[in-house]
């Protein structure tokens, strides 16, 4: 397909690009719906944090979103891509050379799309008082777990917040990850065959928008995958994308096990600005009861009531 030149010498761009770019639009939606089959967002989700994190969140009525590159899980930013690469390589094993070349180009497009749609995330768990989480966040002796009311959280995010987010369940099961990925790849492949037929060669004008459109759908799905080794976290997460955040929020930095890492504050510009916090739990500590008393004062001073708990899990530090 080529641009058309009119009798007066003006060039009119072909209209084929936009239909090809959107050829797979919505394919990811049906896959994501399978993740949520028989699932509902729990009434409460729990965010584990340090003392510094708790003070920052409560004092400023902000939720701290972190770049997925700098999470404790070293494979956070690459795990979904590795699943996709393994599945598509197996799927394309018996296909033509031209199709294999297109699949390789698609993998490059997915890598580029992941950089553009870099997830900015706020991690939560379906359970309070998890030993593995206390160990991860207990480096400053006293960790905390914030309980969020998710019904109110959903209402709160619809207010005048500074960037858009959505809440999603994390998929840990490797078999389910492969199954969902394969179903999406098959759907994309079949649709591409309808559009391109059985030809051995494709023009860049045809192929590039198809690859871009396919990559956008793929990252929506694989961004929900996480290494099965972290399954005990029972994670749900709120997600935005760096492209939706960086022009709206000034990047800040916090101390972590990786050193100084960036984060983005999510907040409402509409009063009341208090977050939908139901309670806070003090993690295992030899000073748990005293820490709980101080926690009550912190919450009351910032308008959050004094619903607190403290863990009795015996951890030696």
Image (cartoon, rainbow, N blue to C red):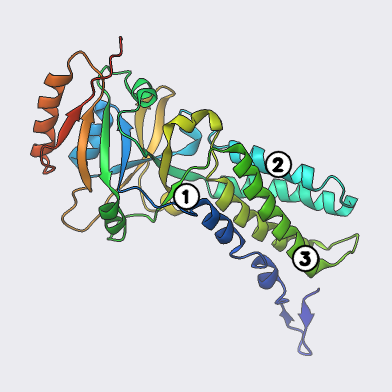
Residue ID at (81%, 48%): 92
Judged from the image, the secondary structure of the residue bearing numbered disc 2 is: helix
* Residue carrying label 3: 206
Q: Residue at x 36, y 33 (%)?
A: 253
Quadrant assignment, res 57: top left
Mark nearest the camera among 1 and 2 is 2
Left or right of residue 195, residue 97 in this image: right
Q: Residue furthest bottom?
A: 7
Q: Residue at x 65, y 40 (%)?
A: 83
Please, is residue 11 above or below residue 71 in the view?
below
Decide: marks 1, 3 in contact (CB < 8 A)? no
Q: Earlier in the sequence, mark 1 or mark 2?
A: 2
Q: What residue did someone put label 2 on?
A: 85
Seen from the viewer's position, the closer of residues 300 and 91 is 91
Mark 2: few, some, or many residues within 10 Å (few <14, many ≥20)?
A: some
Could you tell me which quadrant the N terminus lies in? bottom right
Mark 3 vs 2, N-terminal side: 2
Tell me, for residue 252, which label it has, or none.
none
Q: Specify the quadrant that holds the C terminus.
A: top left
Residue 42, image x, y percentages: 34, 47
Q: Nearer the viewer, residue 1 or 219?
A: 219
* Image position of 128 with respect to 25: above or below: above
Q: Secondary structure at mark 3?
A: helix
């Amino acid at each position: 397909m080529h641009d058309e030149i009119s009798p007066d010498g003006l060039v009119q761009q072909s209209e084929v690009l936009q239909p090809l770019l959107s050829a797979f639009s919505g394919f990811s939606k049906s896959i994501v719906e399978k993740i949520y089959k028989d699932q509902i967002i729990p009434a409460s989700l729990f965010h584990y944090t340090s003392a510094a994190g708790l003070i920052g969140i409560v004092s400023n009525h902000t939720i701290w979103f972190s770049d997925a590159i700098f999470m404790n899980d070293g494979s956070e930013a690459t795990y979904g891509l590795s699943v996709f690469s393994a599945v598509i390589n197996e799927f394309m094993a018996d296909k033509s050379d031209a199709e294999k070349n297109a699949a390789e180009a698609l993998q490059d497009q997915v890598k580029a799309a992941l950089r553009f749609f870099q997830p900015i995330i706020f991690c939560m768990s379906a359970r309070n008082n998890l030993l593995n989480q206390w160990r991860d966040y207990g480096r400053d002796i006293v960790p905390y777990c914030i309980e969020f009311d998710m019904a109110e959280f959903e209402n709160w995010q619809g207010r005048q917040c500074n960037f858009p987010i959505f809440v999603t369940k994390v998929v840990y099961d490797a078999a389910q990850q492969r199954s969902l990925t394969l179903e999406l790849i098959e759907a994309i492949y079949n649709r591409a065959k309808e559009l391109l037929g059985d030809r051995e060669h494709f023009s860049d004008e045809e192929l590039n928008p198809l690859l871009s459109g396919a990559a956008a759908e793929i990252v929506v799905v694989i961004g929900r995958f996480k290494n099965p080794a972290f399954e005990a976290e029972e994670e749900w997460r709120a997600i935005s994308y760096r492209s939706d955040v960086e022009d709206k929020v000034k990047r800040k930095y916090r101390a972590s096990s990786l050193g100084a890492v960036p984060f983005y504050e999510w907040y409402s510009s509409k009063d009341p600005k208090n977050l939908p916090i139901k309670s806070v739990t003090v993690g295992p500590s030899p000073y748990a009861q005293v820490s709980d008393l101080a926690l009550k004062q912190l919450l009351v001073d910032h308008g959050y009531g004094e619903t607190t708990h403290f863990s009795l899990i015996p951890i030696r530090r």
